[in-house]
Amino acid sequence: MKSTICYDDELMAALRNPDEAAEYLNAALADPDQEVFLLALRDVINARGGMSKLAGSAELNRVSLYRMLSKRGNPELRTINRMLAELGFSFAIKPQWSSEKTRA
């Protein structure tokens, strides 16, 4: 019988790599459902030391952080930027269309 590796363990290991984590967050951000991005952000936070560690380094309340990243959470942009900065990431804006193909 073949041994299997838990998907969560593999995901957490991959998300410790900054490039993998950035791709994961970007893919989640492309989804129109905000909850997908919040779930991905929680995964990256867990892979990089957990909520308590992030709350301490970002000077955020741990309980508030859990609440913001819950299914009903609605964190402010400045809070997300703060979390991303502590994780070593930042938001970037890119055009959806090229300058030759602008949306009317």
Image (cartoon, helix red, strand yellow):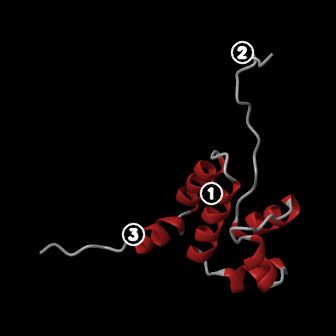
**SS label for mark 1:** helix
Residue at image point 76% right, 51% down: 91
Front residue of 7/47: it is: 7
Q: Position of residue 23 (x, y in %)?
A: 57, 52
The single residue placed furthest to the front in the displayed view is 72
Identity, as a three-letter code, of the amino acid under mark 2? Lys
Of callouts 3 and 2, which one flags the residue occurring earlier in the amino acid sequence? 3
**SS label for mark 3:** helix
Residue at image point 85% right, 81% down: 59
**SS label for mark 2:** loop
Measure the C-alpha gap from mark 3 to mark 2.
41 Å
Mark identifier at residue 36: 1
Identity, as a three-letter code, of the amino acid under mark 3? Tyr
Mark identifier at residue 7: 3
Number of numbered markers: 3
Identity, as a three-letter code, of the amino acid under mark 1? Val
Q: Quadrant of the N terminus?
A: bottom left
Measure the C-alpha gap from mark 3 to mark 1.
18 Å
Of callouts 3 and 1, which one flags the residue occurring earlier in the amino acid sequence? 3
Front residue of 17/77: it is: 77
Q: Nearer the viewer, mark 3 or mark 1?
A: 1
Residue 46 position by quadrant: bottom right
Mark identifier at residue 101: 2
Q: Position of residue 33 (x, y in %)?
A: 67, 51
Q: Position of residue 22 (x, y in %)?
A: 61, 55
